[in-house]
Image: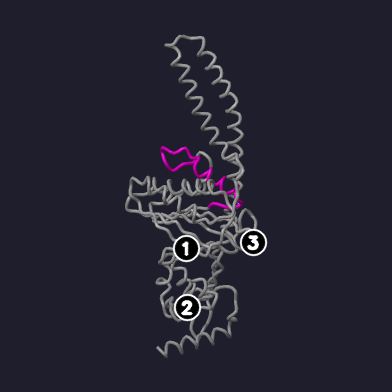
Amino acid sequence: MQSINSEIQKNKNAFQTVLPNQMVTAVMLLDEKLTIQYLNPAAEALLVKSLNTLYQQPLEDVFRTTTIKKDRYLQLLSSGQEFNDGDVTIEFFDLSQITVDLTASSIEFNNAPHILLEFKQIDQQKQISAEAFQQQQWESARDLIRGLAHEIKNPLGGLRGAAQLLNNEISIEQQEYTAMIIEQADRLTNLVDRLLGPNQLPNMAFQNVHVVLEKVNQLISFNNPKGIKLLRDYDPSIPDIEFDEDKLQQAVLNIVNNAIQAISSDNTITLRTRIASNQTINGKRIKLGVQISIIDDGPGIPSHLQDTIFYPMVSGSSSGTGLGLSICQTLIHQHQGKLLCSSRPGRTEFSILLPILGDNV
């Protein structure tokens, strides 16, 4: 063990003569067998593992999958031609993923050819860009739907009124037809009202978010025909924040009900709360926020729906109206927060991020 530690220290000292240890870029050094010889502190932070743990480990034992194949590294050793890839997805064995800008080059180290990998994580930049685009698309779709809903609502009122007047002029046998017209007009009016979304301003008050989650847990326990297990993972240190209890409960309950419909009785749903720091919400930087996560281990949302899941009239269920998540987005938006979703088979997570008052920057 001591000899391994001395080898690691020797490599550290030798490598620091080539590049400074304080580099912000994550750096990994591989030998000809593609085993790890050195990590700088930035790389240790990126991989959440120390050099002592990963020393002499094959690269394929560190990364479960990556979009850069082994042959490219071997070709680099033989040709010396460096390469750069600006959008590399790396998946670890715990199924977590990162996206990096990767530069690979060949260097001489300890009188032998080695590969120098430089990683720059770009997940946050991609996420901010994607969120801004999705927010713009959601607002455009919402405004279009609302405009159409207003145009539909006025003729519906006239149609219903005409059917009521006609109802007084016809026989009892014929009144079943006008009754059907009135019933369907009311149904369409109700749909239009849902398309228009919540029209009342939130009734904000300082309180604990766990009050809402406990009510949702209680409501689900009363109506859970599949017997799905609902787990709770709360951070008790979360302070009171300002929100409308009814609207937040409506949003969380709708997401949980969607998850129950999508998963089987063998799956579980977890309600989790955490403090989130240095987040961007609708273009504003937030020092501290509260993150409420609804996580299930079901089959996941189809990939072709994930970019549009919050748009009105988009649903993954054949019996759904596609309004639930759009309404949830509106409710969270009224709280100056944001609603996000990430999904893959085995894990779907909806995250509600709400700012802590006074911590905006």
Quarter of the picture holding the C terminus: bottom right
What number of labels is visible?
3
The mark closer to the camera, 3 or 1, is 3
Residue 304 in sight in this render: no
Residue drawn at (62%, 43%), measured in percent from left and top? 201
Residue 218: percent from left, percent from top: 41, 50
The amino acid type of the residue labelled 2 equals Ser
| Label number found at residue 97 | 1
Earlier in the chain: of badge 1 and badge 2, it is 2
Q: Which image quarter: residue 277?
A: bottom right
The amino acid type of the residue labelled 3 equals Asp
Write down the residue under mark 3. Answer: 359
Residue 2: percent from left, percent from top: 42, 90
Q: Callout 2: few (<14), some (14-19), or many (20+) C-alpha neighbours within 10 Å?
A: some
Q: Dots 1 and 2: beta carbons under 8 Å?
A: no
Quarter of the picture holding the N terminus: bottom left
Earlier in the chain: of badge 3 and badge 2, it is 2
Q: Which of 4 and 276 is in front in this view?
A: 276
Q: Is residue 316 magenta?
A: yes
Residue 296 in sight in this render: yes
| Label number found at residue 50 | 2
Earlier in the chain: of badge 3 and badge 1, it is 1
Q: Callout 1: few (<14), some (14-19), or many (20+) C-alpha neighbours within 10 Å?
A: some
Secondary structure of the residue carrying tag 1 is: strand
Residue 14: percent from left, percent from top: 54, 87
Magenta part of the chain = 314-339
Q: Is residue 146 magenta?
A: no
| Label number found at residue 193 | none
The alpha-carbon separation of the residues under discs 3 and 2 comes to 33 Å
